[in-house]
Amino acid sequence: AAFTYQLALEQGEEGVVVGHNGLTLSRASLGTFVEWCGLTSPNGFAGDAMPTGFMIAAPHGREAAVLSAGLAIEQIVRG
C-alpha cells in the first residue's frame, strides 16, 4: 500500500507530518515577513493522496482583491 499523508497521521509519523507542513508553510513565510495579505484554498489531492492547493498573495491593503480573486478561482475549481 502507498504511504500517504493520512496514513502518516494515523501511524503517528510526526516527522512526515511536520516535514510536509514545513514545506507548505515555507511558501507563506516570505509574505508574512513583508506583511502581505494572502489566502490559500484546497483544490484536490495529488496522486499520492497528498492535499494540494493554491495560494494568492498581494501587498498590504489589497485584501479585497485577494478575496475577490480567491472566490473567482474557487468557482472555477469547484466547476
Image: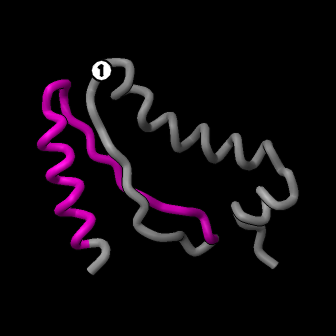
Asked whether residue 61 is drawn in magenta, I would say yes
From the image, which quarter does the N terminus lie in? bottom right
Asked whether residue 51 is drawn in magenta, I would say yes
Residue ID at (46%, 70%): 44
The residue carrying pointer 1 sits among few (fewer than 14), some (14 to 19) or many (20 or more) residues within 10 Å by Cα, namely: few
Magenta-colored span: 49-76
Q: Amino acid at mark 1?
A: Glu
Horizontal side of residue 27 vs 38, given as left or right:
right
Residue ID at (78%, 58%): 8
Q: Tell which of 36 and 71 is nearer to you.
A: 71
Could you tell me which secondary element the residue under label 1 belongs to? Answer: loop
Q: Can you give x and y, in whole percent of width and height, for residue 69 in the image? A: 17, 53
Horizontal side of residue 52 vs 1, given as left or right:
left
Q: Residue reaching furthest top?
A: 34
Q: What is the quadrant of residue 47 in the picture?
A: bottom right
34 vs 53: above or below = above
Q: Can you give x and y, in whole percent of width and height, for residue 2 in the image? A: 76, 74
Residue ID at (34%, 48%): 55
46 vs 27: above or below = below
Residue ID at (30%, 72%): 77
From the image, which quarter does the C terminus lie in? bottom left
Q: Can you give x and y, in whole percent of width and height, for residue 51 in the image? A: 54, 62
Q: Can you give x and y, in whole percent of width and height, for residue 63 in the image? A: 18, 36
Q: What colour scheme has been applied to the protein in the rendered image?
A: one colour
- Residue where numbered disc 1 is placed: 35
Horizontal side of residue 44 vs 67, given as left or right:
right
